[in-house]
Amino acid sequence: MRPPGDCQNMDELRTEIDRLDRELVALLVARAGYIDRAIDLKTTAQLPARIDARVAEVLENVRTLAAQQGLDPDLAGALWERLIEWSIAREERVLGPGTEGTTE
């Protein structure tokens, strides 16, 4: 991994961005695996796909982590909101819509 300041030209910079994109996609694939496991566990525990308190907790955690690491918390929050909604929709395809809530 080359720090951004060590990139001497756009080709080097783009190489590092592409590398990071590959890592991010791999992490999202791993996260989706945990969402799939959540489907199994929620089925057994008779939990809905959407648990509003957990959604709020995840968003708060991400915004805090982002701020601590110098990333705009609004950007992180918006990205995670989309990721969470995608994850809930993935769960609802199997579990059906829950009774916990439909927003957040």
Image (cartoon, rainbow, N blue to C red):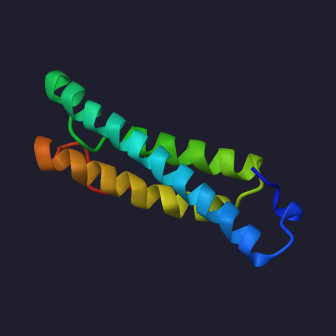
The structure residue drawn at horizontal position 41% and vertical position 39%, both measured from the top left corner, is 30
Relative to 19, is 44 on the left or the right?
A: left
> Relative to the observer, which residue lies in front, 95 or 4?
4
Q: How many marks?
A: 0
Answer above or below: position of 46 versus 77: above
The structure residue drawn at horizontal position 66% and vertical position 46%, both measured from the top left corner, is 64
The structure residue drawn at horizontal position 26% and vertical position 37%, both measured from the top left corner, is 36
Answer above or below: position of 93 versus 21: above
> Relative to the observer, which residue lies in front, 46 or 9?
9
Relative to 74, is 13 on the left or the right?
A: right
Residue 73 makes an appearance in the image: yes
Q: Where residue 32 sits in the image (x, y, percent)?
A: 35, 43
Q: Where residue 95 sits in the image (x, y, percent)?
A: 13, 41
Residue 97 makes an appearance in the image: no
Answer above or below: position of 64 versus 104: above
Relative to 96, is 85 on the left or the right?
A: right
The structure residue drawn at horizontal position 41% and vertical position 41%, both measured from the top left corner, is 31
Specify the farthest residue to the top: 44
Q: Where residue 61 sits in the image (x, y, percent)?
A: 58, 42
The answer to which image quadrant residue 4 occupies is bottom right
The answer to which image quadrant residue 12 occupies is bottom right
Relative to 80, is 6 on the left or the right?
A: right
The C terminus: image quadrant: bottom left
Q: Where residue 98 sits in the image (x, y, percent)?
A: 17, 44
